[in-house]
Amino acid sequence: MSRNQSRLHHWKLRAQELFGIDLRSLAIFRISVALIVIIDLITRATDLESHYTDRGVLPIDTVLEHSPKWRLSVHLLNGSIEFQAALFIIAGLFAIGLLLGYHTRFVTPVVWFLTISLNSRNWLLMQGGDYILCLLLFWSMFLPLGARYSIDHLRNPHQFQGSNLIFSGGTIAALLQICFVYWFSVALKSPKNWLIRGTGVYYALMLDRYVTNFGKLLLESHPLLLKFLTYATMGIEAFGPLLAFSPFFSGPVRCLVVLSFMVFHFSMGLALELWLFTYICIASWLLFIPGWFWDQLLRKFKTPFQGSNSPIREQAIWKNVLAVSFLIYILIWNLRTVNPSLSLPKAAQSIGYTLRLDQWWGLFRGPSRKDGWHVIVGELRDGTKVNLLNPDRTVSWEKPELVIAIHKNHRWRRYFRHFWFKEDYAHYLCQRWNETHTGQKQLTSLEIYYLHETNYRNQRVSKPTKELLLSYTCE
């Protein structure tokens, strides 16, 4: 072999190492994603009737009337609580199968399909974490999730025995998808707030609809710290993914990058109530854990190594071609979010929405200075005024100490961020209240208000202005 051929072979192996995924990392990723799906289903199940049945805030007729025809959702077939509960149980069972790595090739597409189906049933509840979860489950269908630490591996230990490294179109697409989340987040951020003034983190922490008690404490810190955190956020989002593909000292450098992003998202989750987004982002970086880490860990515990350094390549050419094709598709989709002049035919757009490949990473891009909270006042037959968001407390127009505590959980908070179809919600409130109250304590009418605020520099906030969103008479 000539010197040039030797160099080419060396860099080819290095590229496969950088764009491949260690099967042990892939297994830990599978377990983490399955646990997130299971916990998310349990959380959603506490509002099963409210969010997913015809007795809730978004009946199927409303979805079909206002949602495009390409929504892919088996949850839209029936609006009864029994049907929805059955789908939840089925989804949970398949998620457990994914967790255990049982018939993983079959289970993964089912978990993906039921996840996008659930999100399309009530898309008003979707947040950034849901989009990432759908995308990761989609790319997981191109990856051998059950190759390690699974029932599948116990049943067929000789499959993928030659190496711990898998390299394919699916591995390239999955890794770059994670990078796109950060690169296009940077591209969408306002240069004025995030680069010139360095006020991006400050204004994010001023948003009461997201900020936690820890975030409020951080807001009280020195302005220079908030400015440093703003530039640090831009730096890690822009250059962190690039460092993950460093060809020099790739093992230690990649481990450092993975740890940095985990700390980054954990810290962000302490300051801002993002729930699913925090955990699924942390889980996504498990794919980047290099084989070097596992080899060092095994060496420490004096466990014999498994496999060689030569990567395993997926045999099905069509699978690689399909993965690369979808990768190009989502790249174009993301470029359109930065430059809307780029065109994508409606038929091509419908593919993205149907498969939930649609994505937009502009959270806190400004961030917005507009903020506020809801107050819902009900009137009973005896003339009593009640606080329908918190019946245990009297009606108050004062700003709550912690705005995120107004709502039961992050799904309700997300619902009120959109808050479309207010009459359906008002009907739901009347129905729920009057089923548990009789006589003069029944609800006759309600009014939904939004108190607007505008955030300024130096923690100045405008005086709240009251807006009546809906006045509703209970039938």
Image (tube, helix red, strand yellow):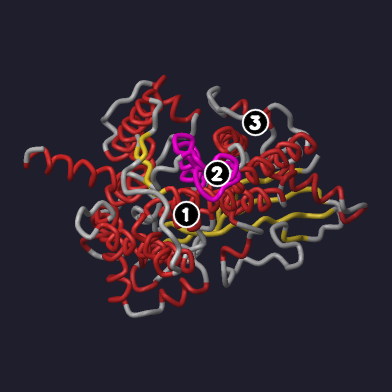
Q: Which residue is mark 1?
A: 283
- Spot the residue most to the left: 3
Q: Which residues are magenta?
A: 130-159
Rendered location of residue 225, percent (x, y): 31, 76
Element class at badge 1: helix
* Main SS, magenta residues: helix
Residue 62, numbered circle: 3
| Kind of residue at disc 3 | Thr
Residue at (48%, 54%) from the top-left corner? 277
Rendered location of residue 365, percent (x, y): 34, 53
Residue 153, numbered circle: 2
- Whichever of callouts 2 and 1 sits on the residue coming sooner in the sequence is 2
Q: 312 above or below 273?
A: above
Q: 312 above or below 235?
A: above
* Residue 423, visible in the rendered structure: no
* Residue 420, visible in the rendered structure: yes
Q: 227 above or below 470?
A: below
